[in-house]
Amino acid sequence: MKILVIGSGGREHAILWKLSQSPRVTQLLCAPGNAGTQQIATNHPVAASDLPALLALAKSEAVDLTIVGPDDPLAEGIVDLFQSEGLRIFGPRAAAARLESSKSFAKGFMDRHGIPTAASSTFSELEDALVHCRTASYPLVVKADGLALGKGVVIAQNQTEAETVIQQMMVDKIFGDAGATVVVEDFLTGPECSLHALVDGAKYLLFPDARDHKRALDGDLGPNTGGMGTISPSRVLDAAMQERVRNEILEPFVAGLKVDGLQFQGMLFPGLMITPQGPKVLEFNCRFGDPETQVLMRRLKSDLLDLIEATIDGRLSEVHPIWDDRTAVCIVLASGGYPGLIEKGKVISGLESVGTDPDVEVFHAGTAWKEGKFVTNGGRVLGITALGSTLEEARIKAYAVADQINFEGKQLRRDIGA
Ligand code: AMP
Ligand code: GLY
């Protein structure tokens, strides 16, 4: 089978790495890809946002199946487009992808179907939002309604901060149209975890839990990023809490899709907070997480292609994946300045001398191959992913390799999973 993966991050490299182990895969393509995907797939220089060009590529290459990595093409309707042309593709249609691309839509869905989440109000008029701030209790969470590269959530400590950020989003348009509407919600407390579940429209298949480290600096300081490292299992979901998550979140989610007539054959990735009252949804993502996918693919022992196909065909009840019960850790090496302005093109050294430990895999993200060298090409550069029989063993292995690889400005957190 010939498979096209759309995207260029560590998530896409990890998905391709896993697919490359499938006996049923004959050829892998990636658009646009990175220097790591190039080693196991044919990269095509087509942007993940260029839907017509992606369609043309899938047709001209006679691709059998397309897997979408990032959120934007899903929100733009790539699944609807490919399906209307008779092509096989993994992911929710645009109407269902709104669960990620519109926070107010997701809030409405959760309220309609009784899924626990923070109490919220949605505003598209500045004056109404400001009036709300006068009587709200603080801290208060202000969210841009649309996709904002993971930067659209601000925790306001007082009324002044809330008013400022609402002005920035709604009037100054710092997130463009994504901030024209804002969702204002109660501040919750508790440990967070990343859940992944394949959803075939009627059933779901829960993956092991993972935990992201979103802040840029050690000790959860600094600005929010796309994710600086992950562990799986998360160590915040015990069996009883997992049962609650199934009953209170996943069951009502798939039931709600049916009631609302939403077509979702893809990956659901809810961000959860385990509050004193139980699990609550902070946000829905409608795709694989990055860098959650890196640890999940390391732990998946079964064929990913079987799971993807069962999802598309509505046969999830027939597949029973096997997971490595060891712990996986992914350490992200980022460019200096990330998540702010970064410089690209720094030569990456040490990749060639990384050992051959089968438990350690280096997934590429923002990398390129230039004049015979690996160079940096984005904010998050590499994800060093290791398995260990204990969390500590996995951390030691991952950090040992992370320390062998260098580039100017290299930035990493030392406390992933600590
Ligand atoms: P999101 O993009 O919605 O996942 O939000 C990004 C981060 O903001 C989350 O990982 C949480 O740390 C924080 N956050 C979001 N919503 C809330 C909330 N209602 N209460 C407390 N923290 C939140
Ligand atoms: N690591 C968080 C995300 O993929 O959204």
Image (spheres, rainbow, N blue to C red):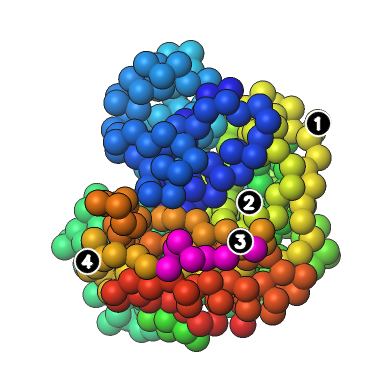
- In the picture, the disc for residue 318 is 1
Task: Tell us which disc is closer to us: 1 or 2.
Answer: 2
Q: Give the camera-side residue of 406 and 390.
A: 406
Q: Label 2 vs label 4: CA separation? A: 30 Å
What's under tag 4, amino acid-wise? Glu
Q: Name the residue under label 2.
A: 297
Q: What stretch is highlighted in magenta?
A: 350-357
Q: Mark 3 points at which residue?
A: 356
Instruction: Give residue 294's position: percent from left, percent from top.
Output: 57, 56
**Of callouts 4 and 3, which one flags the residue occurring earlier in the amino acid sequence?**
4
Mark 1 falls on what kind of element?
helix
Residue at 37% in and 16% down: 60
Task: Tell us which disc is closer to us: 4 or 1.
Answer: 4
Mark 4 closeness class: few <14, some 14–19, many ≥20 residues within 10 Å: some
Q: Can residue 403 be seen in this view?
A: yes
Residue at 77% in and 56% down: 324
Q: Label 4 vs label 3: CA separation? A: 30 Å
